Image (cartoon, grey):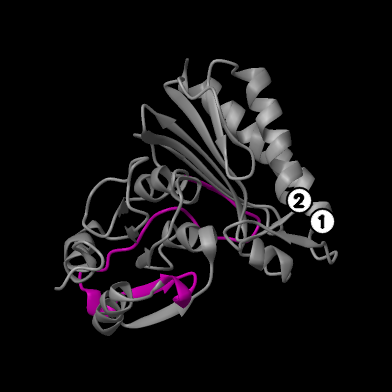
Amino acid sequence: MTDRILLDAAIAAADLARSVILPFFRTGVRADVKGDESPVTIADRNAEQAMRALLRERLPDCGVLGEEFGLDRPEARLRWVLDPIDGTRAFLTGRPTFGTLIGLLDDGVPVLGIIDQPATGERWIGLAGQPTRFETPLGGRAGTRLCPALADAELSCTDPAMMTGDAASRFAALQNATRRTSWGGDCYAYGLLALGQIDVIAERTMKIWDWTAIVPVVEGAGGRVTDWNGRALRPDSDGTVLAVGDPGLAAPAAGLLGGPLGSPR
């Protein structure tokens, strides 16, 4: 199966999800609460079902794992990983920082990723071994920025509530070492890192559908994505994510964050 076939399918799925999601944006759509206390809407469910149907029709031999409807074809080496609305809280409150995430794993390794922002029309497309492509009506170009010192870095995290217990003190150490911290953003923050607007993102409790798509996007723009110990993200990773625009920041950031959570430093 060629990269072109896979990429065309991913782009078609992103187009379809955008067409499903946009009619619900800023309409006061109701949210249900899932077992993990996170919200879900009809837009999440309809978009994932539409993408699954498209990918199943185009590439029936691939597996599909989605946040809302689980795993099909678990034996497949190639597996699509879908998050129809990453940032449902932002979506519910009318903020254009949510996004659709479409990733592809090849034997557990992220090889293709799309971050799509339906409301702004922005889209990041990452394919392993190729430069990230950025499509936008707003301006900007893909490419992380040089930032050799943590002291000059812009740090971002979606939600301070992620940082509890031992993780809170480790994140605070990273905050103290960087220039300033911004909150919020979900997957959109990783897109901004891929544009050179943010230098470091540190998060935890991340599921596989939260990070699969961002790895090819960030790394294709010149950055690096690992867990807090500097290890490549894989399906059995521990839920921590560290993304840096300048790869030189990876080691000092991981030095402040790393080690088994819950253990003494």
Residue 118 x/y as whole percent: 69, 53
Q: Which mark is residue 203?
A: none
Q: Secondary structure at mark 2?
A: helix
Compared with residue 113, is residue 150 higher up or lower down, i.e. above or below?
A: below
Tell me the quarter of the picture where residue 202 sits. Answer: bottom left
Residue 68 in the magenta stretch? The answer is no
Task: Answer left or right for 75 relative to 89.
Answer: left
Task: Give the total number of marks visible in the rendering.
Answer: 2
User: Which residues fall within the magenta stretch?
Assistant: 133-162
Residue sitting farthest toward the front:
35
Amino acid type shown at disc 2: Ala
Amino acid type shown at disc 1: Phe
The residue where tag 2 is placed is 43
Tell me the quarter of the picture where residue 193 sits. Answer: bottom left
**Cβ–Cβ below 8 Å for labels 1 and 2?**
yes
**Mark 1 → mark 2, Cα distance in angstroms:** 6 Å
Task: Answer left or right for 132 relative to 109.
Answer: right
Tell me the quarter of the picture where residue 179 sits. Answer: bottom left
Residue 176 x/y as whole percent: 27, 84
Labels 1 and 2: the sequence-earlier one: 1
- Residue at horizontal 64 percent and vertical 38 percent from the top: 69
Task: Answer left or right for 58 relative to 129.
Answer: right
Q: Which mark is residue 24?
A: 1
For the C terminus, the image quarter is: bottom left
- Residue at horizontal 35 percent and vertical 47 percent from the top: 219
Residue 58 x/y as whole percent: 64, 19
Residue 68 x/y as whole percent: 64, 44
Residue 141 in the magenta stretch? The answer is yes
Q: Secondary structure at mark 1?
A: helix
Residue sitting farthest toward the left:
265
Mark 2 residue crowding within 10 angstroms, few (<14) / some (14–19) / many (20+): many
Judging depth in this view, the residue of 51 and 200 nearest the camera is 51
